[in-house]
Image (cartoon, rainbow, N blue to C red):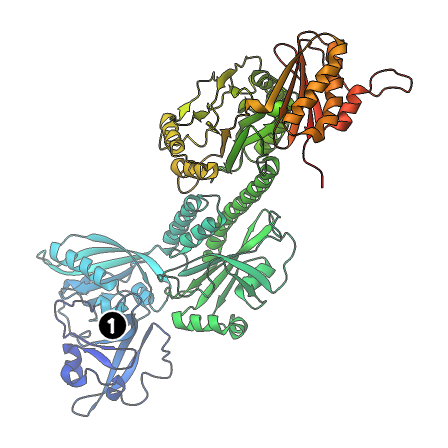
Amino acid sequence: MSPVYPFDDAATARAVIDAGGRLVEWNEGAQRLLGWPAAEVLGRRAADLVIGTAPGPEFDPRDIRWHGIVTLRHQDGSEVPVWVLVHRTEAAEGGPVRWLVVTPLEGDAPRAADDPLEQVGLLQSPCAVAIYDERLRLRRMNEVMAQVLELPEERVRGLRVFELTGRRQSADIERHLRRVLTTGQGHDVRTHVPAGGDVRGHAWLARMAPVTDSTGRVRGVCVAAHDFTEEYLARERLQLVNEASVRIGTTLDVTRTAQELAEVCVPALADFVSVDLLDPPDSGAEPLAGPLSAPISLRRAAHRSLNPGTPEAVIKPGHVDLYPAPSPQADSLLAGHTIVATIESDDLEDWLTWDPTRLERIKEYGIHSTMSVPIQARGLTLGVAVLARFRREDPFTPDDVLLAEEVTARAAVCIDNARRFSRERETALALQRSLLPRSLPRTAAVDGASRYLPAARAGVGGDWFDVIPLSGMRVAMVVGDVVGHGIQASATMGRLRTAVRTLADIDLAPDELLTHLDDLVVRLSAEAGSEGSPGEVGATCLYAVYDPVSRRCTMARAGHPPPVVMVPGGEPVQVELPAGPPLGLGGLPFESTELELREGSVLAFYTDGLIESRERDVDAGHDLLCDALATYTDSLDETCDRILHALLPPGGAPDDVALLLARTRGLPASQVATWHIPADPALVAPIRKQVVEQLEVWELLEASFTAELVVSELVTNAIRYGAHPIRLRLIHDATTLICEVSDTSHTAPHLRRAKTFDEGGRGLLLVAQLTQRWGSRHTTEGKTIWAEIGLLDEE
């Protein structure tokens, strides 16, 4: 849109020429100067009105301003030598280039001796001062203002502000001048425009004051301009650095941090910014610390432009490109410092010759200056940021380099932190995956399904779960949560999981197992402390043992969320279970609870990350869990997924989540046989016979020889060394036959090697050789010795 010119428009001859050299504007003053009406010249080539080769050999179309004497053709055919001022301008920001041509027509008109505008003292002022008359046309200016405008006063008298500068900001300046002229009150204006023919913007404080005559009438406006560019730029740099410290590094995501760097620099420092990073040598490895060599492979992490869609970019984010030695990226990385290059100085000639695609983009968008800043942190080279200008006409300055390096240094630390976090997270995840069960064991007691999800942002924690087969077809189920995140939490989790498996192997009751586990956590806390200060190792745990023969489940918890159980045909309910103290407090008791479960009951064990959320309380989380579990059909895996989908936000859980679902199975009474053994060694033979008969009923005669020997040895030992009553129990499923002998003595047998002339001591050695495994467990009444015999033939 063309500016609006109030007041007298004929005091200046003004024309506008488009990029094709044709006249598109012609005012009344131009007709007054050359006689041509607008209707006869608009659309014609401007060169048709010029006589000779003017505007002269010193004219360069790349300049933003030119002034000199041109000989023009009058309508009557005569020649008119005219001093003209030519501005390169734009109709709008980013619009087509046009040329504004102006010359004053009344600048040297005689003035009255008592004209107040002629009497204003100018020559002694150290500031740039200009006087505008009632028509807002320049009447006078001092030498300082002439130096600022780089125009002689005698040539430009009578021109308007827009005609003097050719800048879009001139309309605002004239508006403020008009305000002073009409109100008679002074006014201060801050603006940012180039000075004279300089392409760089300058910050100005213009103090405008009315000029009055002896009667007090306002006859014009005096403008004193103060250049405070250095202070303005210093404040802008400080503001940008402060903004960078706030906006860069809001997450521990490398790509997001790189994008924040690009967004901070555009448009404050550049018109286009690309951030390219070096890929680590291997997953989880440190970036390269040694010297680089060209060509350099870089992955585009982010870019930003003033133009929507970033059309200047040749590489898309996430893609890798190879940069040879002439490229700005490789040159700055090889040199280890910032490199500024411009098109005019041919600094990029070799690079653009090598890459015609980029050459085409540079020509298309008018990129004229680039600045390549290495991204370095802690002695490591992470990548490079390339800043380019095309909308801003001024090239990068040394101050711009310092500013870009400071902002990039802040971003480099954040990128390095994000990468270190990612490496630690991947290491912790790998450690956690190696410590967690890859698959749940198949048991006769339960069918299971599980899920583990690491925290979306907080890092890998110490959540774990496990299913542990026990003797007598029983199974232990455990879920726990170590306080904290990271490798330390994962390592502590691994130690606790191993301890639970060891304690479960000796068949401790749930409350007793948690007591031993609590002692271990206390010791770990002491080891984690320094100089006598206790450590901060803590954990919660839930331990349950299910027996498919009795269909009873015994469980205890140490500060862990209670499980949810759903019996067939019923609704999910939370198990009433004493909370118990968290592990690591030491010396506090744990309590067990026993409940009977129908076959097909579903138990849900989980960590607090599943039900706790900032958006809802724990009770609401429990309700959602129960609602999701209530939709269970037959698939435990589908139910796991449904629970996670119902309780976790789309972006991932804020804390680690472990979920274990177990569907109970019952062992039919037909697969269990029990005998009460009298205290008479002579009755061992009849017992062996009854065992063989039972195996024949079960169609397991292939195991009868081994079973006879095992039963004979275990029963004989119980009669000799145990206490009455004694009980023999056989349990079998499709793959295993279990022999159990129980008595009321708490003395456990142990395997030893018999000497050559010993008459005994070989029985348990024989049992160990004939069975898959054997062992003992303590009960409330005494102990049970058990042995497992495999029923599947080895291939």
Q: Would you say 283 lies left or right of 140 here?
A: right
Q: On the image, which quarter does residue 571 sit in?
A: top left
Location of residue 560 in the rendering, given as x and y in whole percent from the top left corner: 49, 23
Left-right relation of 91 to 453: left
Q: Residues within 10 Å of mark 1 (few under 14, many from 20)?
A: many
Q: Quadrant of residue 425?
A: top right
User: How many dots with numbers?
Assistant: 1
Q: Where 320 falls versus 64 (above or below)?
A: above
From this view, report whether residue 54 is shown above or below residue 112: below
Q: For the view shown, which residue lies furthest in the right direction?
A: 757
Q: Is residue 653 visible?
A: no
Instruction: Indicate the amino acid at tag 1.
Output: Val
Residue 749 percent across, percent down from the top left: 74, 16
**Which of the pair 392/645 is nearer the observer?**
645
Residue at the spot 52% in from the left edge and 49% down from the top edge? 412
Residue at point 84%, 16% (across, down): 760
Image quadrant in which you'd find residue 488: top right
Quadrant where the N terminus sits is: bottom left
User: Is residue 646 or residue 456 the one in the foreground?
Assistant: 646
Residue bearing the label numbered 1: 156
Frontmost residue, 742 versus 536 = 742
Q: Outermost residue toward the left?
A: 215
Q: Is residue 773 above or below residue 1?
A: above
Which of the two residues, 42 or 703, is positioned nearer the viewer here?
703
Residue 65 is situated, as x and y percent measured from the top left of the image, at 32, 73
Q: Residue at x 35, y 30 (%)?
A: 616
For numbered disc 1, what is the local secondary structure? helix
Residue drawn at x 43%, y 68% as measured from the top left: 368
Residue 516: horizontal and vertical position, in percent? 62, 18
Does any portion of residue 367 appear in the rendered image? yes
